[in-house]
């Protein structure tokens, strides 16, 4: 599936989450051809355990086996250690027990579809690990054993550094990773401009999965309908308490970096520039192709060389609002496959990215 859904299980509404409703939405997505699901790596292991047991577990139990086995693809995250203290507790035994414990929580008698190895983004997060970590060969060898034993089907990465992947490939593990997930969207193309990631995709067939393609919701039609015109009228930037955690992160990070690195060099009125230079073009293209802004943003990524898929975060709302936006959002995802951007428009969007 070229569009995956990343389940966001954290946030102030977590205590109100209804696992039964979330499972129903996953089944609805499955019927609409959206078959790949990931749990976003949470800050608390208890949140991930809840997701595996209450969401994945119920989904596996309540979805007919023939449908599930033929279509659904479930991924769980595993955070790689970020310092020597964590590294000391990360060994083959830990990996094996983590996967078997997850399968038990999910009530699954089958293999785990995918394990996603997550490395703190070495290009952005403060870390001393810019070279391959010494533990990784044992880790990969254990994962290969689990595949041979039928407990694990596939392995993917998130923010894995080129140095780490190349070191693994040099030791015979070049075929282990299905893809490497990287932050990539219309105004944040830093990873795509990293020639090493493109070489890995070409040399070792490790394609890119684009994460955060919609800027935490800031590149969606729902945002335009609900909020954009309001802030234009108010002539102000959204305040922190008015945004989701994901949108807040992109406003302070991606949009600020985009504004400071653009050709004009003008960092003033970042929000105004984002609305004019990004949104105005997206809305124009939306009218040209008769699809949503969401579909335009996704289609642009899917036409990039070496980008195999995109992953969109979701909280799996329990029901449609008065505008039927949950149904609309699924349609927007599907519509991304029903047209192609002209070369001229692809370049026009590249120009926006800076």
Image (cartoon, rainbow, N blue to C red):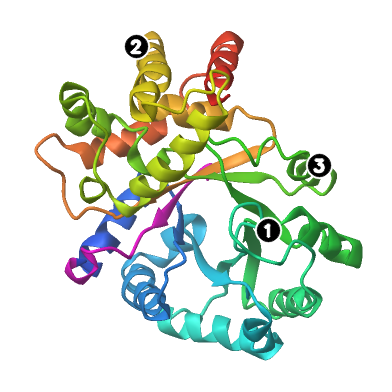
Give the residue pinned by disc 3.
199
Mark-to-mark CA distance, 3 and 2: 36 Å
State the residue in front, 334 or 313: 313
Mark-to-mark CA distance, 1 and 3: 14 Å
Label 1: few (<14), some or many (≥20) within 10 Å?
Answer: many
Label 2: few (<14), some or many (≥20) within 10 Å?
Answer: few
Q: In this view, does 180 lie to the left or right of 171?
A: left
Closer to us: mark 3 or mark 2?
3
Are the two marked residues, 3 and 2, in contact with CB atoms closer than 8 angstroms?
no
Q: What stretch is highlighted in magenta?
A: 1-16
State the residue in front, 242 or 8: 242
State the residue in front, 268 or 25: 268
Q: What element carries label 3?
A: helix
Closer to us: mark 1 or mark 2?
1
Above or below, 240 against 44 in this view is above
Q: Is residue 53 left or right of residue 212?
A: left
Label 3: few (<14), some or many (≥20) within 10 Å?
Answer: some
Q: What element carries label 1?
A: loop
Task: Tell me which numbered mark, 1 or 2, is placed earlier along the sequence.
Answer: 1
Give the residue pinned by disc 1.
160
User: Residue 287's mark?
Assistant: 2
């Amino acid at each position: 599936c070229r569009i995956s859904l990343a389940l966001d299980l954290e946030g102030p509404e977590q205590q109100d989450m209804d696992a039964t409703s979330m499972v129903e939405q996953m089944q609805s997505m499955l019927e609409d051809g959206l078959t790949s699901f990931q749990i976003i790596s949470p800050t608390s292991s208890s949140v991930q355990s809840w997701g595996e047991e209450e969401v994945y577990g119920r989904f596996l139990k309540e979805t007919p086996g023939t449908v599930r086995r033929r279509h659904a693809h479930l991924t769980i995250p595993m955070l790689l250690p970020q310092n020597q203290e964590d590294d000391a507790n990360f060994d083959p035994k830990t990996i094996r027990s983590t996967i078997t414990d997850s399968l038990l929580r999910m009530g699954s008698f089958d293999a785990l579809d995918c394990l996603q190895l997550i490395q703190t983004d070495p290009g952005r997060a403060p870390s001393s690990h810019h070279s391959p970590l010494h533990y990784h060969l044992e880790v990969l060898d254990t994962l290969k054993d689990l595949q041979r034993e039928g407990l694990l089907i596939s392995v993917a990465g998130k923010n894995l550094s080129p140095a780490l992947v190349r070191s693994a490939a040099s030791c015979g593990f070049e075929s282990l990773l299905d893809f490497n997930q990287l932050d990539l969207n219309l105004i944040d193309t830093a990873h795509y401009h990293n020639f090493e990631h493109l070489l890995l995709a070409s040399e070792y067939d490790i394609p890119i999965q684009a994460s955060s393609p919609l800027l935490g919701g800031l590149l969606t039609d729902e945002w335009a309908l609900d909020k954009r015109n309001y802030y234009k009228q108010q002539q102000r930037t959204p305040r922190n308490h008015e945004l989701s955690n994901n949108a807040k992160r992109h406003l302070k990070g991606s949009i600020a970096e985009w504004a400071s690195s653009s050709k004009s060099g003008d960092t003033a009125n970042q929000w105004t520039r984002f609305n004019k230079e990004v949104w105005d073009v997206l809305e124009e293209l939306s009218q040209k192709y008769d699809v949503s802004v969401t579909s335009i943003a996704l289609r642009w990524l899917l036409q990039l060389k070496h980008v195999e898929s995109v992953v969109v975060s979701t909280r799996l709302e329990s029901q449609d609002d008065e505008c039927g936006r949950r149904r609309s959002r699924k349609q927007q995802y599907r519509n991304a496959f029903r047209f192609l951007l002209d070369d001229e428009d692809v370049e026009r969007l590249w120009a926006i990215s800076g």
